[in-house]
Image: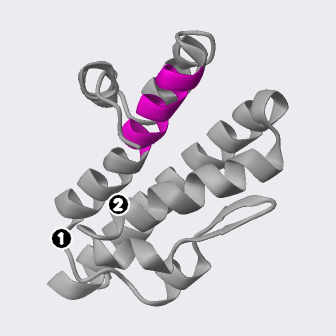
Amino acid sequence: MNEKKYSEKEVETKIKQEIIGLYEELFKTLWEKIAVTLGGITLVALFRRIIRKVSLKYTWMKRVEVGEEGLDFKNLHRKMCESDKEVMKEGFNTVIAELFSFLTQMTGDILIGELENIVEKYIPEMKEESRTTNKELIF
């Protein structure tokens, strides 16, 4: 066989791109679902606040832009995060936890159950984590 050999850095970059792509799809789906109830303007303000807060710990998150259509990951795709893939997942999962915490405080369980089902389809291990972290007020 004539298989191409990839360097460790190339493999890591590919894995990170796949992680970003997964979360990009997840946030797009969540945005579309939540926008029906809260509206785009509210979501822009909410996600800007969450991204700003989360980027204090995960500075690479500043590359994610929030606009009227949702989250834009192109700057993150272009300039890859220096953190390892587990730290990237942790940062994205923190955004989800912050989102769920806010929505729980504002709407109770009205939106959360359906959103948890969406998240679980993309990231099965988030099921228990989202339920434990969304109990504390974040704002």
Tell us which disc is closer to us: 1 or 2: 2
Q: Residues within 10 Å of mark 2 (few under 14, many from 20)?
A: some
Expressed as whole percent of the image width and height from the top left, the position of residue 11 reads 26, 76
Query: Which residue sits at x=48%, y=80%?
Result: 63
Instruction: State whether the magenta stretch is mostly helix, strand or loop.
Output: helix
Residue nearest the observer in this picture, 41 or 90:
41
Check disc 1 and give the amino acid type. Answer: Asp
On screen, residue 17 above or below 70: below
Query: Which residue sits at x=43%, y=89%?
Result: 79
- Asked which quadrant contains residue 123, the reply is top left
Query: Which residue sits at x=20%, y=75%?
Result: 83
Residue 81 visible, this orientation: yes
On screen, residue 14 above or below 123: below
Which quadrant: the C terminus? Answer: top left
Expressed as whole percent of the image width and height from the top left, the position of residue 50 reads 47, 55
Q: Label 1, on which residue?
A: 84
Range of residues picked out in magenta: 96-106
Residue 6 visible, this orientation: no
Check disc 2 and give the amino acid type. Answer: Val
Q: Say the numbered circle drawn on residue 54.
A: 2
On screen, residue 134 above or below 23: above
- Asked which quadrant contains residue 68, the reply is bottom right
Is residue 126 in the magenta section?
A: no
Residue nearest the observer in this picture, 138 or 69:
138
Q: Residue furthest front?
A: 139
Q: Is residue 91 left or right of residue 29?
A: left
Q: Say the numbered circle drawn on residue 65.
A: none
Give the alpha-carbon distance from disc 1 to disc 2, as whole Å.
17 Å
Give the structural element (helix, strand or loop) at label 1: loop
